[in-house]
Amino acid sequence: MKRLIIGFATASSPQLERDKIVQVGAIYSLFGNIVPESLRASGLDGDSITNANPVRLNARTVLKILIRCIFTRNIVFNSYYLGPWFSNFGHFLLESITRINTNIAVSRYKLLFHTMDSSIFHQKIFQYQENLLSTIGISRNRVKILINNPVLIFNSTIVSGNAIFPRELKPAALEVINLIKRSTKTNLDFGEKIYISRQKLSLERQRIPENLSLDLEKIFQEHGFKVIHPQELDIRDQISAISKSKYLAGPQGSALHLSIFCDPGTTIIEIGDEVQEIFPNTQQKIICNLLNQNFCFIPYNAVDKKYDFKKIEDLIKI
């Protein structure tokens, strides 16, 4: 963590350029020096987000920003800066909230984030995010998403990231995950075997031909798995029910990252799709390794558009 007595945050709505999101928004000291901990460190081979923040701002630029903040009264006292804010569930779960710890959750300080979404329709707090944060006592009005206007900040703590997506997830990230897990207990129970379906998502998000998706669900159901559609459930019910499972299966993607709430020793079965056919999701493997979960991967034959159902059946005869 880095303490900043007086500083400011630049903020500009991210722009999409050549299929990459250009990030312009960071924390700076009063002297115009960037605070490196405020930059997103995630991504492989350039990632889809490009950092366009200057390392140092000149005195004239700093003065203009300070005057603008004072004129617009965009000033925040006592805050934690917690990095990137994503609308995407997987990134939100693993990057946006994993800087939170117990002390931050129980404090009354503002929580500052920079939006990582280029679409104005996604630059907001979604209901699932509000519900998830509420489980650990964080109300919606404590969250401030930095989008288009600079903010003058007094007494802010810049919290270092615990996730470098999709390369690393530090053990410290589990503090908030375990806090949420302990605080999210509902009566919903699907048993010890759960299959997460993408069948009811939009066609571009299903990533598996419909006939194969139905065949997969059928074979898992025949072996005692309960098929669920997470988007139809409150996030609190999702976490509570999935945390009780001993076997969690489904196509790779954000929903399967809910395995981070499962106990060590849980078997996680990831199914390849048209996006990643023969290689498992890197982030999913990192989650499973960190939690000592049993990870299995079922590849997809994109040429013949089929799975080895005999291998699947042998795997789930449990």
Image (cartoon, rainbow, N blue to C red):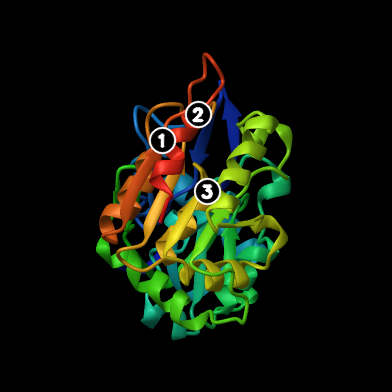
Measuring 33% from the left and 64% from the top, which residue is drawn there?
Answer: 173
Q: CA distance from mark 2 to mark 1?
A: 9 Å
As drawn, 178 above or below 295 = below
Regarding mark 2 in the picture, which secondary structure is present there? loop
Instruction: Kindly check if marks 1 and 3 are in contact, taking CB atoms under 8 A apart as contact.
Output: no
Instruction: Kindly check if marks 2 and 1 are in contact, taking CB atoms under 8 A apart as contact.
Output: yes
Amino acid type, residue under disc 2 in the picture: Tyr
On the image, the x and y values in percent for residue 247 come to 44, 59
Amino acid type, residue under disc 1 in the picture: Lys
On the image, the x and y values in percent for residue 133 come to 56, 73
The numbered mark at residue 307 is: 2
Q: Which residue is mark 1?
A: 311
Q: Nearer the viewer, mark 2 or mark 3?
A: 2
On the image, the x and y values in percent for residue 218 come to 63, 45
- Which quadrant holds the N terminus? bottom left
The numbered mark at residue 270 is: none
As drawn, 57 above or below 308 = below
As drawn, 140 above or below 161 = below
Between residues 283 and 124, which one lies in front from this camera angle?
283
Q: CA distance from mark 1 to mark 3?
A: 25 Å
Q: Which residue is mark 3?
A: 254
Left or right for 163, reference 244? left
